[in-house]
Image (cartoon, rainbow, N blue to C red):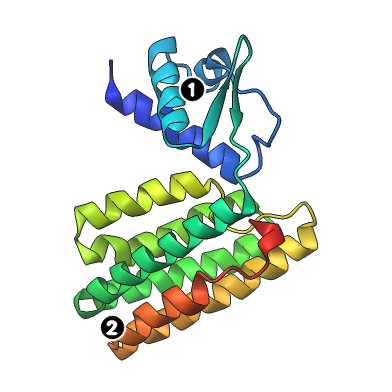
Amino acid sequence: MDSSLRKLATKMILEKIQHGDFSAGDVISESEICKILNISRTPAREALIELVANGVLEKVPRKGYQITNASQKQKIDAYIVLASLDALAGRLACPMMTDQDILHMQELTDLIDVAIKYKNYASYCELQEKFHQVYIKRADNQVLSRMLDEIKSSVIRYTYFSEDIDTQFETCKLMNDEHKKIIELFQSGDADAVGHYLEHVHWVTKDYKLI
């Protein structure tokens, strides 16, 4: 079985959950994943099984799979771990950041502003993940990177989401203002300040109803 197809299917399912395309109560089937990605049943099945193992989905007998209904405490607990790991990545990356990294992050915040202006949540999610990946990659720690990927998968939506579109994008704007502050802290070269801000400001839940 081609593991790259399984990874692609896993990534696509997670993105659809994060963007709100798959919601609680929706049944996700192997055949649906096969049709969307134009792949065989084996990688689709393996992706779904992996997401069950990670706690993202649960098997519904004779129907398919549904998003796991995690408790509020489970979500908040995951956020606490995510904040700590991301802060560590920031501290490790700080002395290694280049001018090109900073420029790339600035460009991404500009693009995020555009996504917010046009209320494009899918684009916002994709761009903000690229923003964080700049310093996560610069940290150059594969174990840490893998742990961050796993915890983000368990949180399902680790960006804020609301059915009220105005509330949604007000929060997105606040988060992008924080992205710009993160850039300033990286420019200062203060690794402890970067880590503290990521853990105790940026990843602190702004509204429990949105996670």
Q: Nearer the viewer, residue 98 or 25?
A: 25
Neighbourhood count class around disc 2 (C-alpha, 10 Å): few under 14, some 14–19, many 20 upward:
many
Circles 2 and 1: CB atoms closer than 8 Å: no
Secondary structure of the residue carrying numbered label 2: helix
Q: Position of residue 202 (x, y in %)?
A: 50, 74
The structure residue drawn at horizontal position 47% and vertical position 29%, both measured from the top left corner, is 52
Location of mark 2 (residue):
191
Q: Quadrant of residue 73?
A: bottom right
Q: Nearer the viewer, residue 8 or 116?
A: 8
Task: Decide: few, some or many residues near mark 1? Use Cα within 10 Å; few <14, some 14-19, many ≥20.
Answer: few
Screen quadrant of the C terminus: bottom right
Earlier-in-chain disc, 2 versus 1: 1
Q: Is residue 16 above or below residue 75?
A: above
Q: Percent from the top left, x then y, of residue 42?
A: 39, 12
Give the amino acid at mark 1.
Answer: Leu
According to the image, label 1 marks what residue?
37
Residue at 68% across, 58% down: 210
